[in-house]
Image (cartoon, rainbow, N blue to C red):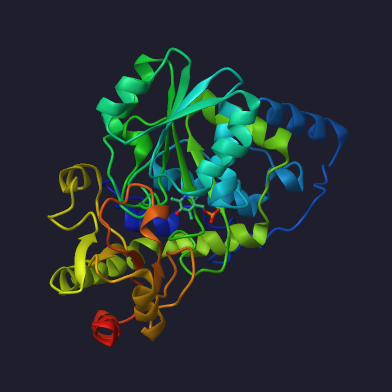
């Protein structure tokens, strides 16, 4: 690969983490290397590999430390996020837990954005608090974080944008605040999946991503990643070895396959979602529509400044006089929208939720989260129109 100009991201995603030659030629994708034991030619090589590993280097030395399949994905994922090192975890939640458990010591304090992925609240109450790690919620703004940060704060943990309501945060300003207080800024970057936003390039210290969503893109693998630079990246890796966290090479292989096409898939999700968001904005049964690419989004300015695109998630708030059971009927009537959690696959999904259970949700109307898949958007719009007519 040689070029006079810097290659665009779409092109780099095709060439990253590719296979090595074998028998003088090479397959398109790296092979799935499955092994526990890794055989060295002699004791000296084995010892040298172990020493390099302890130093924080990535070495093919034992199945749990990752095989060349995992390493190819790590290399590609780090490049996608603009970071030096990517670590793989069995789920997005495991990646989040690893960061919280290894970076926070008893006696320290963490500021947590209110609208982060719901399971983070369980880590907070069931794991951090009983072990003497204090936490405070903040609303995602720098002003609120500055008012609540304490001398014990070692981390600001946020999601950009937050789950369900897509509240956008100013990563640059939050990173300045965190670093002034000797704290880390950790961003859950699942919404942008590396392609649309790169927190490390805006001053964050750690990016965590649920690859389960758009990176995999086909709803058939659970995987997470942590991306960080320098000594922090090496320390997170050493702790990953301590904790025995690893990912199957089969899952790494499928994720690498998903990663190849993310730059082709996301713009389709985004264009269809924006069209459907505008259609729903004009519908009499829908009170509001949340999607960062809409001009009406509260922090549309931050999305324009820090993101290169959008995705397929749209949350609608139904008119307040339509109760949850009517909304459930609407969703049950849809033919093209699957009913289930998660998102980021090729198919569309719809998920209603009781308003009081959605953090950051303000209006009384019932929220429904839509994931717009890769179907023809006219078919999806007709399905939604029919479903709304059934309860209207
Ligand atoms: C889904 C999700 C996770 C968790 O990922 P899993 O792979 O399902 O554990 C974490 N953060 C965000 C923002 C998510 O949407």
Q: Which residue lies furthest to the top in this view?
A: 151
Q: Quadrant of residue 49?
A: top right
Q: Is residue 206 visible?
A: yes
Q: Residue at position x 30%, y 34% from top?
A: 171
Q: Residue furthest right?
A: 43
Q: Which of 139 and 161 is in front in this view?
A: 139
Locate residue 223, reporting x and y percent: 57, 55
Locate residue 307, reporting x and y percent: 25, 47
Position of residue 80 relative to residue 112, above or below, is: below
Q: Which of 18 and 383 is in front in this view?
A: 383
Q: Which of 386 and 161 is in front in this view?
A: 386
Q: Is residue 253 left or right of residue 327?
A: right
Quadrant of the snapshot with the C terminus: bottom left
Q: Residue at position x 51%, y 43% from top?
A: 120
Q: Is residue 126 left or right of residue 190?
A: right
Q: Is residue 57 visible?
A: no
Q: Residue at position x 49%, y 65% from top?
A: 341
Locate residue 136, reporting x and y percent: 44, 29
Q: How many labels does the image show?
A: 0
Position of residue 273 relative to residue 20, above or below, is: below
Position of residue 307 relative to residue 268, above or below, is: above
Locate residue 145, reporting x and y percent: 33, 26
């Amino acid at each position: 690969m040689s070029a006079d100009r810097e290659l665009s991201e779409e092109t780099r995603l095709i060439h990253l983490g590719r296979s090595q030659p074998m028998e003088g030629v090479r397959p398109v994708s790296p092979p799935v290397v499955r092994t526990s034991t890794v055989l060295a030619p002699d004791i000296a090589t084995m010892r040298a590999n172990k020493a390099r590993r302890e130093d924080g280097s990535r070495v093919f030395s034992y199945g749990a430390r990752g095989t060349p399949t995992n390493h190819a994905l790590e290399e590609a994922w780090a490049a996608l996020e603009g970071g030096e090192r990517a670590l793989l975890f069995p789920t997005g939640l495991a990646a989040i837990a690893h960061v919280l458990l290894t970076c926070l010591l008893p006696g320290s304090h963490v500021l947590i954005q209110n609208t982060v992925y719901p399971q983070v609240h369980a880590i907070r109450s069931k794991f951090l608090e009983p072990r003497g790690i204090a936490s405070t919620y903040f609303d995602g703004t720098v002003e609120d974080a500055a008012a609540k940060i304490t001398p014990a704060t070692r981390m600001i943990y946020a999601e950009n944008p937050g789950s369900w309501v897509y509240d956008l945060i100013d990563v640059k300003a939050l990173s300045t605040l965190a670093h002034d207080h000797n704290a880390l800024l950790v961003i859950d970057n699942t919404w942008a999946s590396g392609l649309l936003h790169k927190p490390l390039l805006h001053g964050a210290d750690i990016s965590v991503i649920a690859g389960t969503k758009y990176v995999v893109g086909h709803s058939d693998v659970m995987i997470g990643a942590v991306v960080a630079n320098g000594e922090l990246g090496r320390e997170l890796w050493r702790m990953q070895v301590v904790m025995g966290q690893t990912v199957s090479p089969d899952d790494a292989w499928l994720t690498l396959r998903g990663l190849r096409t993310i730059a082709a898939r996301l713009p389709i999700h985004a264009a269809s979602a924006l069209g459907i968001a505008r259609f729903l904005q004009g519908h009499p049964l829908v009170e509001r529509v949340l999607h960062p690419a809409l001009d009406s989004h509260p922090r549309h300015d931050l999305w324009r400044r820090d993101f290169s695109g959008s995705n397929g998630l749209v949350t609608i708030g139904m008119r307040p006089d339509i109760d949850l059971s009517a909304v459930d009927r609407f969703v049950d009537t849809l033919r093209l929208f699957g009913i289930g959690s998660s998102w980021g696959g090729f198919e569309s999904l719809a998920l209603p939720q009781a308003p009081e259970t959605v953090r950051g949700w303000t209006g009384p109307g019932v929220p429904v989260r839509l994931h717009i898949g890769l179907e023809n958007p006219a078919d999806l719009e007709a399905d939604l129109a029919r479903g709304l007519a059934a309860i209207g």
